[in-house]
Image (cartoon, rainbow, N blue to C red):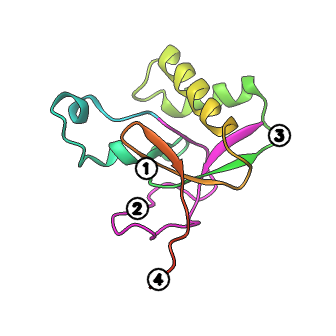
Amino acid sequence: MKVLIATTDLQGENPDDFMRAVPGELVVDVGPCQDATAIDDWSCACARSFVGVSSGHMTTTAKVVDNVAVDLRSYEAAVKQGLSDWCCPECARDIARASRIIATQWNEGTVIERNRSTIRAREHRPIM
């Protein structure tokens, strides 16, 4: 099953990149926070990051991997448990499903980034 993990691959391509999640941990896309959307302030880190399921920390890059050891039920359970401190079980399940859908749209090994509601493949930018 394709899932998203925190990665250091292509980190630093943007000057405001950050990696506070644990490399290799499952990450999910929780979307921008209500504060960012309510006042249209997109400078909030949540507008361009994924959240680590185990650590709860954010990263600006995620990598698509095909993890044969994970099935839908165990994936949703891991996300529910990881987000349980601040997210209701139904919301966690919805976040898990949405993040899995994101992962299925990309080839394995693709590094992705998010900016507001846009998720795209991150490309290496050569230094000129």
For the image, the number of numbered tags is 4
In the image as oriented, which residue stretches furthest toward the left? 39
Foreground pick, 48 / 118: 118
Mark 2 and mark 1 residues within 8 Å of each other at the beta carbon:
yes
The structure residue drawn at horizontal position 34% and vertical position 35%, both measured from the top left corner, is: 32
Q: In terms of sequence position, does the residue under pointer 4 or pointer 2 come before the other?
A: 2
The stretch in magenta equals: 1-29
Relative vertical location of residue 61 with respect to residue 85 in this rendering, above or below: below
The structure residue drawn at horizontal position 35% and vertical position 69%, both measured from the top left corner, is: 15
The residue labelled by disc 3 is 69
Q: Quadrant of residue 14?
A: bottom left
Relative vertical location of residue 106 with respect to residue 19 in this rendering, above or below: above
The structure residue drawn at horizontal position 45% and vertical position 54%, both measured from the top left corner, is: 60
The residue labelled by disc 4 is 127
97 vs 29, left or right, is right
Viewport quadrant of the C terminus: bottom left
Asked if the stretch drawn in magenta spans residue 2, the answer is: yes
The kind of secondary structure the magenta stretch mainly shows is loop
Viewport quadrant of the N terminus: top right
The residue labelled by disc 2 is 18
